[in-house]
Image (tube, grey):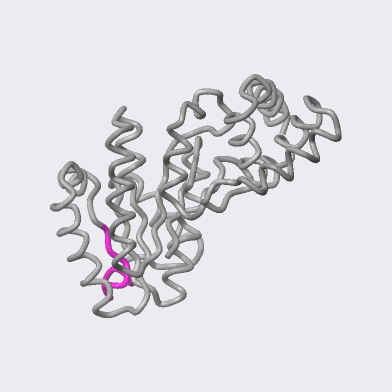
Amino acid sequence: MQHALQLYQEESRLLDGLTEFVTAGLRGEDAVVVIASTPRWQLLVERLRKSGIAAHEHVARGQLRLFGLQVMLGVTPNRQRFSEVMNGVLALAHARHQRVRIFSELTDALWRSGGRASARRCEGYWHKLLAVHEFQLLCACPIDSLEDDAYDGTLQALCAEHTHVRPAFDEAAFEDAVSAAVAEVLDPELVRMLAALSAAHRPSAEMPPGQAMLFWLNDHMPRTAERVLSRARARWSEH
């Protein structure tokens, strides 16, 4: 089971991850289900075309399927209804393909509309489905993990519902920014201690070491966390 969360600030960053996710599925003969708005679907199809994949051919074969965002948002308030709809979608996908992967824009849309509690509840619905069915799931959420307000408990709660978390930025540059900020704020001995503690007590979801450090600092040294985030943002702006 893989339930990944792609954080993003720029649409291009999300489309990079989404195109990679869908392309890998189509080339691997997986069934691919995309729950998305029409504009994002169109952007995805264009990205696939540029990479040499004719999306309409995979749609015609039933390997690639679009489910409209507004239709799915209508069933998310009710867990039973959500499960009924998605059980049907998964049964249809598994009828022809052994492996299934799904991209869901639901959490993204709920978050952007201000429904953070609903977004977290929706992730719980997915978690229960993943306990019963075998499929890969990619979700998205417009969170900047270098901003102070991301650490009010919401990002931690979202991460806890996922097996993998991908930063909103280029991962190598993100790691460089956090590492440099930590080195500026803390003495070398404390830096080594922080690395060991954050690795030993990292969240259950797989994530970059720098993200695990930020979580640990926020939980145990909040004032230091504010300073590290400020320096990391400055470093990132220079990238």
Say which residue appears at 52% left-offset and 44% top-offset: 13
Q: Residue 127 or 16: which is nearer the viewer?
A: 127
Q: Position of residue 167 (x, y in %)?
A: 56, 43
Q: Position of residue 44 (x, y in %)?
A: 40, 53
State left or right for residue 129 relative to residue 197. left
Q: Residue furthest toward the right?
A: 188
Q: Position of residue 221 (x, y in %)?
A: 65, 26
State left or right for residue 91 relative to residue 205. left
* 27 relative to 101, above or below: below
Q: Residue 131 or 110: which is nearer the viewer?
A: 131
Say which residue appears at 31% left-offset and 27% top-offset: 114
Q: Which residues are magenta?
A: 57-66
Q: Position of residue 15 (x, y in %)?
A: 47, 49
Say which residue appears at 37% left-offset and 55% top-offset: 103
Q: Is residue 101 magenta?
A: no
Say which residue appears at 58% left-offset and 36% top-offset: 215
Q: Quadrant of residue 119?
A: top left
Q: Residue 116 or 101: which is nearer the viewer?
A: 116
